[in-house]
Amino acid sequence: MTLTLADVDPVHAGAGGGMLQTAQRVGSALGVAVVLAQFFARLGQTRGDYPKAFSDSLHTTIGFVGLALLLALLDLFRRRIRRRPGPAAEPAAA
């Protein structure tokens, strides 16, 4: 959450926090919907093979978590590069 709200002006911290919570809730709901849809579709295709349906859904969940981790790391590195100071300016010769 610190990375998400790092660029929000403290005056707007409440609105920024609200947007963060809303995005988290919507993302969670969409993720659950996709994984459950896949689970039940696979369950129907395999005529009740719960282990296969569970395994496929678990792989999808792991993929989503891996993608989220990758995006978080990319954001972290982007922020570190952006904040890295440039070369120090040399004083002008008199």
Image (cartoon, rainbow, N blue to C red):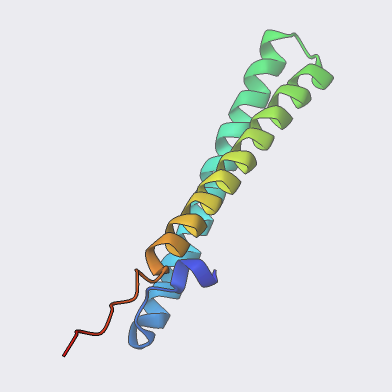
Front in this rendered view, residue 33 or 82: 82
Q: Position of residue 54 (x, y in %)?
A: 77, 26
Would you say 50 lies left or right of 31 here?
A: right
> Residue 31: horizontal and vertical position, in percent?
56, 41
Taking the view exactly as shown, the residue that stands out farthest to the right is 51
State whether residue 13 is above or below residue 31: below
The one nearer the camera, 52 or 66, is: 66
Q: Nearer the viewer, residue 37 or 65?
A: 65
- Horizontal and vertical percent position of residue 82: 38, 63
Question: Which residue occupies the foreground of this view, 91 or 85?
Answer: 91
Q: Residue at coordinates 35% horizontally, 69% vertically from top-left? A: 86
Task: Identify the residue at horizontal 68%, vertical 13% (top origin).
Answer: 44
Q: Is residue 32 left or right of residue 85?
A: right
Above or below: residue 43 compared with residue 82: above
Residue 33 found in image quarter: top right
Which quadrant: the C terminus?
bottom left
- Residue 68, image x and y in percent? 56, 46
Judged from this view, the residue extending furthest toward the front is 94
Height in image: 8 above or below 72? below
Q: Is residue 94 left or right of residue 45?
A: left
Q: Is residue 45 left or right of residue 18?
A: right
The residue furthest left is 94
Which of the image's four quarters has the N terminus? bottom right
Tell me the residue at 81%/20% (across/down).
50
